């Protein structure tokens, strides 16, 4: 986290991992050799930029953030239909908080560029003749209102 100027916050994170599954015997007798660990991208990262400034006696904010992950497999078998390409997703938020921190109102957009990507997939073609795929939410927008009842 860095705060290079008044009201400006920058955050950056990342992870590298080198995973491998060796010598796993599956129920059907197949032995896996040197497969990647499922749902473990080699690289993932995130970035955030937030700017806060005084407005009408409270604090307004403008925020953008993004996540990225490299390609990965959803299962240890890693059939071609179970592989997901790398992707990036961006989000945006405009907010206002009253001076007493009691009320916070934000307008947000998640998946700003409407990126289609799967959060899970399974090759069931040998079992029921089809592939199961679960996609992430498309672009979503809304308003969030929070009231703080505490001190």
Image (cartoon, grey):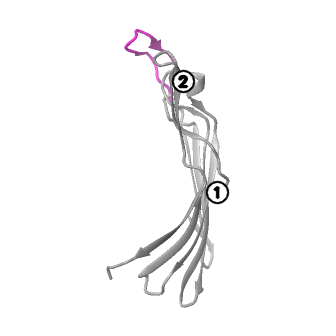
Observer-side mark, 1 or 2, equals 1
What is the x, y in percent for residue 105? 50, 75
Given residues 113 and 53, the one toward you in this image is 113
Looking at the rendered image, the quarter that the C terminus falls into is bottom left
Asked if residue 24 is among those painted magenta in the image, a careful observer would answer yes
Which residues fall within the magenta stretch?
A: 19-36
Between discs 1 and 2, the one toward the N terminus: 2
Residue shown at 59% from the left, 26% from the top: 81
Asked if residue 136 is among those painted magenta in the image, a careful observer would answer no
Residue shown at 41% from the left, 82% from the top: 102
Looking at the rendered image, the quarter that the N terminus falls into is bottom right
Q: Secondary structure at mark 1?
A: loop
Given residues 40 and 20, the one toward you in this image is 40
- Can residue 35 be seen here? no
Q: How many marks?
A: 2
Q: Which circle marks residue 78 in the picture?
A: 2
What is the x, y in percent for residue 18? 54, 33
- Specify the farthest residue to the left: 150
What is the CA distance from the residue labelled 1 to the residue labelled 2?
A: 29 Å
In this picture, residue 28 sits left or right of residue 92: left
What is the x, y in percent for residue 148? 37, 78
Given residues 135 and 39, the one toward you in this image is 135
Q: Main secondary structure of the magenta part?
A: loop
Q: Secondary structure at mark 2?
A: loop
Given residues 50 and 119, the one toward you in this image is 119
The quarter of the picture where residue 7 lies is bottom right
In this picture, residue 22 sits left or right of residue 11: left
Q: Residues within 10 Å of mark 2 (few under 14, many from 20)?
A: some
């Amino acid at each position: 986290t860095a705060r290079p100027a008044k009201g400006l916050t920058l955050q950056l994170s990342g992870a590298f991992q080198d995973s491998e599954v060796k010598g796993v015997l599956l129920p059907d007798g197949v032995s896996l050799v040197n497969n990647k660990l499922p749902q473990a991208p080699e690289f993932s990262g995130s970035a955030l930029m937030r700017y806060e400034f005084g407005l009408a006696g409270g604090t307004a904010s403008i925020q953008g953030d993004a996540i990225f992950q490299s390609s990965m497999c959803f299962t240890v078998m890693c059939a071609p239909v179970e592989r997901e390409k790398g992707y990036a997703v961006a989000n945006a938020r405009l907010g206002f908080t009253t001076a007493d921190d009691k009320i916070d109102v934000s307008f947000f957009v998640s998946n700003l560029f409407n990126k289609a990507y799967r959060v899970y997939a399974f090759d069931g073609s040998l079992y029921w003749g089809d592939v199961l795929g679960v996609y992430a939410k498309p672009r979503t927008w809304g308003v969030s209102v929070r009231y703080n009842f505490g001190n």
